[in-house]
Amino acid sequence: MPTADELLGTGVVDDLVDCLGLELPLTAATVDGFDGASLSARARLVRDGLLAELPSDHAEFEAVVRSALLRDDFAGWMIWPVTEALAVRATAGDADTFDSGLALLADLTSRLTGEFAIRTFLDADLDRTLATALTWTTHDDPHVRRLATEGTRPFLPWARRVPALTTRPDATREILGALYRDESDYVRRSVANHLNDISRTDPALVVAQATGWTENADANTPKLVRHALRTLIKKGHPDALSLLGFGAPTGVAVEDLVLTPSDVPTGGDLAFGFDLVNDSDSERSVAVDYVIHHVKANGSRTAKVFKLTTRSLPPRSRVPVARTHSFRPITTRRYYPGEHLVDIQVNGLTLGGAKFWLG
């Protein structure tokens, strides 16, 4: 993966200065602050440098940026700080300046997404920004259509939170409804991720919207809905499971759960297997997950759900299932020694479990 220095280093800043036609380099503090700074921190440093060097009048500022857009090399990660500077300038002016800034952001987003900069517009005037974003849903450029849904996600990765998007989870419903059948998979995946974000605050709204889409589906809708409901499925939300065809697992049981070894060394693997049994006279569709209850530093436990399988169980059948789970060190989780648990979850219900020791 490229480093922050490769994506937004001094060479990229020099190229940006050239694209914008600046006679002098950005303030020394801009590049001097790069040492050890993250990509987002570098973007903010360059943003501040641009605000100091470019015209304070928004119309003049926009003219400089639009002139740069005539160049093919005005592209890539250098665009991020430009969009951030644009957002600061545009939201400091009147309504016409605000709208003009959003239009320029849409033009910039095909060079590099404006999904982070649009958060400044959303903070300044949520409804005005969403009204403009809705018009983008019919734009010819899929990057602009995606900006409408990705930039307005409540929990967009890397981006700062916009409180109004979490307190008003239905605010983007019309935008998502306009894009869920978009011709671009790039856009549809953003719609699914956006709806999945909303599931953290309003599961009922998410299920209702997904249900409506299912009733007016095209060939791509089932995949989108599955992706959008993935967090609710892991949590065993009954309405989400039912929408995907996974009803109550009547007659289904987990039998003969075996863990190997029962004492897992740090950095080792846990193998487990069990039989999935359907004692009923009807076929059962099942979504099977396993849950690891990790020991925390204070001795309590926290659960993490992992996907295992989805399948149809014939009547009066017994199906073996096996998996190996690794406890090798990863950057996103720290393992602590102690008694852990593993549960087997079928259609949101825990049907079996066992203990093991890690350490």
Image (cartoon, rainbow, N blue to C red):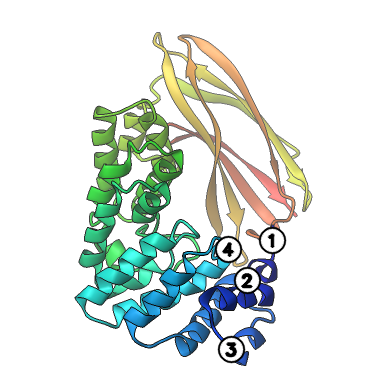
Q: Which marked residue is nearer to the observer: mark 2 or mark 4? A: 4
On residue 2, the disc is 1
Q: Secondary structure at mark 1?
A: loop
Alpha carbon distance from label 1 to label 2 = 10 Å
Residue 163 image position (x, y, % from top left)? 31, 69
Alpha carbon distance from label 3 to label 1 = 28 Å
Q: Which marked residue is nearer to the observer: mark 3 or mark 2? A: 3
Q: Which marked residue is nearer to the observer: mark 3 or mark 1? A: 3
Point 36% across, 66% down: residue: 104
Q: What kind of residue is marked 1?
A: Pro
Alpha carbon distance from label 1 to label 4 = 19 Å
Residue 257 image position (x, y, % from top left)? 62, 29
Q: Are marks 3 and 1 in contact (CB under 8 Å)?
A: no
Residue 117 position (above or below residue 336): below
Q: Residue tagged by mark 3?
A: 24
Q: Quadrant of the C terminus?
A: bottom right
- Tell me the crowding category of disc 3: few under 14, some 14 to 19, or many 20 or more residues within 10 angstroms, Cα based: few
